[in-house]
Image: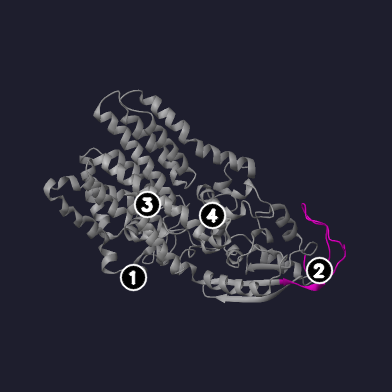
Amino acid sequence: MAASLAVLICLAAGWVFSHGYVLWYGDAQAHLNISRRIFDSRTPGYTQIGSPWLPVLHVICLPFVSNNWLWSSGLAGTIPVAVCFVIAGTFFYLALRRSFGTRWAAAIGLACFALNPNLLYLASIPMNEAVFLAEAALALFAVAEFRHQAAVGAGKQSWWPVILAAIAICLATLTRYDGWILLPFAGGALAFGASRRRLLVFVVFCAIASLGPVYWLLHNRIVYDDWLEFYRGPYSALAIYHRGLDEGFKPYPGDHRFGVAFRYYWAAGRLCIGTPLFWIGILGAFAALWKRKGWAILFLAATPLSFIWNMYSGQVPIYMPHLYPFSYYNTRYGIAVLPLAAFAAAALVPWFPERRRWIALAIPLAALSPWLLWPDPGNWICWKESQVNSAARRAWTQAAADYLRANYKDGDRILAPFGDISGIVSSMPLDLRNTIHEGNSAEWTAITGRLDLYHRPKWAIAQQGDFLAQAIDHANRKQTIYQPVLEIYTKGSPVLRVYRRTDASSVYHPPLSSEPRPTEPHSTDPRP
């Protein structure tokens, strides 16, 4: 089974890579660059893990991002995420087999899960959906195994499924914040499935699984002096939303409107998994409840419900192409419905006559029919989202990287924000230690705070209206320090400017941190 899944994801990842789709999601590029900056930075080290994004994806990419080609091509993220897809499929199959006692049910459920083109795309790029699903599937299997041990005989339950589930959920809490909501559901499923010592089972599980949230709270307290930096810090989803509201943007769909939040997430889930599987899953959920698998339905429903709650509370927006404001944003969050629908679909298989269970093959065929009948990638909502939202970014990334590749000299430094603009640097590719960004907090603050006094970097890259662009405009009012040498206009995106430091501004200033002191203190060499 694992070998078949490995072949499947290798074919999918090869197709994605050959068409150049690996880094179409801006978040995919950012995840790789965060992983890279942990060791490749002017201030390398643990603090580069940052906040608010959770660290598991960045950590598992570390063995691969040190290779420039793997990093710049995106394969440094594809490799570990593809492995997670194999783990997810393998343990999902084992969980289904343990839950329903038949290989047919496990195979049908796995086919509905693993052959979904939206999941195959997300499992081929540096995104954390497949990583999270691997951890959830591992926990699902562990709970199913633990409860099965109780069913076959009291007193024969082992502790290893409890420990395995706890480790899986602990990792899930460090992959996505949705994992935090899984903790009580998994703990409850284990406790109520225990034949004895239920309280002890729950306590042991929670003691291990809660290490993830506890660690992340401590990380934010120690590094940022705020336990909740990830929730309310300047780069948190909440802060970004409030800044948008202050600038006059309309509230997110679903913000304190539960019906709207449910409608948008319903639409996202249906487009991610396909309308046929969506309705098959609803029917199968009743079959699963009849088979007394309500604990699994509740566990798998926890993540979709958390998305609806986050939309209601204003934490997460989801935009759909057929719903106002008629665009694509976070549509991939609907993929969380897939394991729930696939598990429910598998619950239908035991209802088929044992000698005619081959008829159940109609279930995955129906589930995949939207893409079998219309195989164009434009019908894959996750791929379409990445295509539409990355068009402008891909255009200016390529143009800026081509320009700098032709004009950049070894030793030059680049002043640039770390977000999407860092993709220009990795596309060249250029070591991140040659850039100065927000992650180099002291140096970044010193330079951007007083560009008129301290302006060592030869290059700067900024988008119109961002913090760095404003700092450059302010400094240039006194003296022209940075001259735009390239302006890139793209539809739907602010103007991107590449600046070059003027020779007149190339005066020496005392170095920050441990930079070596120049031989000529007052050299007029324009390069730092």
Seen in the image, is 360 located left or right of residue 195?
A: left
In the rendered image, is residue 312 in sight? Answer: no
* Neighbour tally class for label 1: few under 14, some 14-19, many 20 plus, Cα within 10 Å: few
- The residue identified by callout 2 is 506
Amino acid type, callout 2: Ser
- Mark 2 to mark 4 CA distance (whole Å): 38 Å
On-image quarter of the C terminus: bottom right
Q: Amino acid at mark 3?
A: Ala
Query: What residue is disc 4 on?
Result: 64
What residue is pinned by disc 1?
A: 376
Q: Which stretch did the figure color magenta?
A: 500-528
Dot 1: what SS?
A: loop
Q: Which mark is residue 336?
A: 3
Tag in front: 2 or 4: 4
Q: Quadrant of residue 520?
A: bottom right
> Given contact means CB atoms under 8 Å apart, are the residues at marks 3 and 2 in contact?
no
Secondary element at tag 4: helix
Q: Which residue appears at 55% of the width and 51% of the height?
A: 62
Distance from Cα at disc 4 to Cα at disc 1: 32 Å
